[in-house]
Image: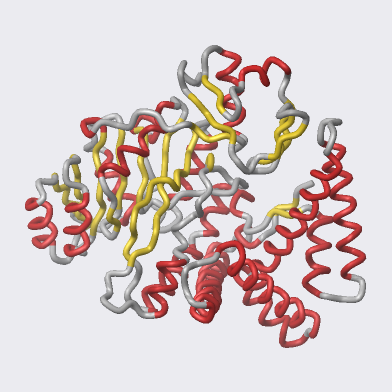
Amino acid sequence: MTLPTGFAVRIRGDVRRLEGSRVLVGGSPLRAVRLSAVATDLLDGDDLVVRDSSSATLARRLLDGNLADPVPGPTLVPDALTVVIPVRDRAEQLDRCLAALTGLVCIVVDDASVDPSAVREVTERHGARLVVLATNVGPAGARNAGLRHVTTPHVAFVDSDVTVSPGTLLALGHHFADPQVALIGPLVRGRSRSGRPRWFERYDVAASSLALGRRSCSVRPGAAVGWLPSACLVGRVEALGNGFAAEMQVGEDVDLVWRLVEAGHVVRYDPGQVAHHDVRTTVRGWLGRKVVYGSGGADLGRRHGDAVAPAILSPAMGLAAAAVLLRGRWSLPIAGVAAFLGARSVRAALPPVRGRAAVASRLSITGLGWAVRQESALLLRHWWPMTALLCMVSRQARRALATAVVVDAAVALTVERPRVGPLTGWVGRRLDDLAYGTGLWLGAIRARDARCLAIRVTK
């Protein structure tokens, strides 16, 4: 679909420019784009305004490659949006959720609560509409039941343990100026309701698995943001069809995003808007939820193939990263050769412009670092049961595991930098990894499908 006249995009600050902005290197997945003289003339510094078919085509290309972000435009008006809230009991959280949404039309879907009278009382007190389900169908089915009652062009899905303001939901709607956008998600931060949050609550606030970073993104498998949590989403009703896969009890949000992308729609992540999600109040509840999240990987693999792969590696970088983790006497030469070959390959792919050799070298080294991070995550999170078995019989496996722990700690301190103490952060990450990995393996064994554990090999 063509972008409308007046739609504006802005090239991202992390995009490298060569040859006087004629070549753009960056985006997610990483790419190099050479602009023609005509395309370059369409840019006004970092900005591009759609005025004709040529500028619309260029803007779409920049957006799809995550080389540019849309410039915020008009937000939604309240009459254009209905909020659907699935709930099963949780009357106290529902009360907070609805209180934060004052001014918007809300539909509460009671998914067969044990105490339906408490849900009804809260819903009626806030003037929301109540849809009662006779049998428990799960969050996906409950959202779909609410979606069937929506008459506005846009819908927001907000879980009962989430608080978000009307202004945030309406502001996300500016993305709908792009007629191809079907779904948008904000940054979902953890929030503790305890007077004195315990260590695991502080960790979950600082490093919630629902918080997908500060980088805006066009969401798709392989991009910097590959999915969105259903805790808070805003969608275009006509693009959503029947909504979520009702038979899925976990991973239904990932499935919806990937189906929309496969159908040619655009899904965006906007961390400039924030919602808050209540963290779990017990260690069992916190880790249990991580196990549940992991268990959905096998079903996603069955539905979407290697899009669910936990790592994407080229053979050369995969071998070099393994060498770095093993820390053998041959590790440095192998890593050096891989970095050299990677730089040569990237240089050949770049247009023949001044500075491409330096850019290619930096990108190759960055790629090696990313490969090491991915393999460290595999050892500590996705493959930890196999790692544990190998460590019992192999000194090299123990050496690789020790390196992976150091790499993971360095990433946490220098890249992710969660606002939590180092010890709390380290213990939290290890337990998080163990719980998620356990769920991943349980799901794979139950489904007899290991695609959620396999590496996607790329050139």
Q: Position of residue 420 (x, y in %)?
A: 47, 73
User: Can you say whether 287 is above or below 274 in the image?
Assistant: below
Q: Where is residue 311 in the image (x, y as percent from the top left)?
A: 67, 57
Q: Where is residue 180 in the image (x, y as percent from the top left)?
A: 47, 28
Name the residue: 42% across, 41% down.
Answer: 184
Of 101 and 41, nearer the camera is 41
Name the residue: 51% across, 54% down.
Answer: 213
- Residue 34: image quadrant is top right
Q: Position of residue 2 (x, y in %)?
A: 51, 19
- Residue 400: image quadrant is bottom right
Of 76 and 143, nearer the camera is 76
Looking at the image, residue 99 sits to the left or right of residue 339; the answer is: left
- Residue 191: image quadrant is bottom left
The count of marks equals: 0
Of 84 and 225, nearer the camera is 225
Looking at the image, residue 165 sits to the left or right of residue 259; the answer is: left
User: Can you say whether 60 is above or below 398 in the image?
Assistant: above
